[in-house]
Image (cartoon, grey):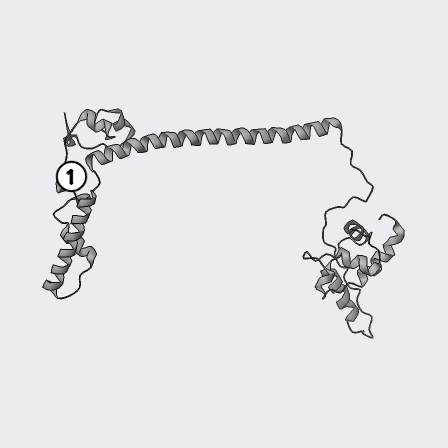
Amino acid sequence: MSSQTETPKILAALAQLDPSDNSHWTSDGLPNTGTVQRIANDQTIKRTDIQSTRPGFDREAAQAAKDAALAPADFEEAPTPAPVVAKALAPVAPQGDTVTVTDEQLHAMLAAVVHDAEAMVTKGRAMEKAGGEMTTNGLKSLSQARVNFHKYFPPATQAENTRAYLEASNAERMARVVAGRSSSQLDAAKRGSAARGWNGQAQSRGPGGARAFSRKEAVALGFAVPGSQAEVNRPTPIRAGGVRA
């Protein structure tokens, strides 16, 4: 719809919009196009027609106009009301206008978009490759680390776990008889396993003991032995007394 003869029809429809009726307005406070079409009895009216006919007209402007119309008359000459300042809206090109773009401009713009997309794909693939390599190396290190860990601190067997549980239960019952009060199973378990080491193993196999390794063995386990490359990479080396020359 581009005929200037339709402008009065749109203006008349806008004047009938009720600022207190939510159905007359969008969530942004702009005139509801469907309501304007119904009042004007013209289904060809578009949002751009409304904006170009009365730029900046919204629910707030309609409320201000309604308040001004309902203001009581005064015998003295009333001051000229301040004009309603229209909100800044994005310019709307009249229907039928065209934008001319040269082939050179279009080529440069599209090529830039393609380049950015290709760069994004390349970066994503590089990150995916680096992540895959990190996962592979991590799994290898994890496997070797678990082998070394269980070599010196093997997990408790099912029989050892059962025996530790029975010892804890007996200690708990004994504590109740001696103290005459309830004792937590956790405390009893701690007392029952006091003579045993980590994971129910012999004390000499758990943390708190001491072992002697050759320098080669210590380096293989990851310790910063004085004079080794690991000492350079790790500022706090273990004491020399912890290994055997």
At a point 77% along the width and 66% down the height, the residue shown is 66
At a point 29% along the width and 28% down the height, the residue shown is 233
Q: Quadrant of the C terminus?
A: top left
Image position of 134 with respect to 204: above or below:
above
Q: Amino acid at mark 1?
A: Arg
Label 1 packing within 10 angstroms: few (<14), some (14-19), many (20+):
some
At a point 78% along the width and 33% down the height, the residue shown is 100
Image position of 120 with respect to 168: above or below:
above
Q: Is residue 68 left or right of residue 8?
A: left
Q: Is residue 79 left or right of residue 227?
A: right
Q: Is residue 143 left or right of residue 28?
A: left
Residue at the farthest left position? 178
Residue 86 placed where, x, y %? Answer: 74, 55
Q: Could you say whether the residue bearing mark 1 is in a helix, strand or loop?
A: helix
Residue 18 placed where, x, y %? Answer: 76, 65
The quadrant holding residue 158 is: top left
Residue at the farthest bottom position? 75
Q: Which residue is mark 1?
A: 205
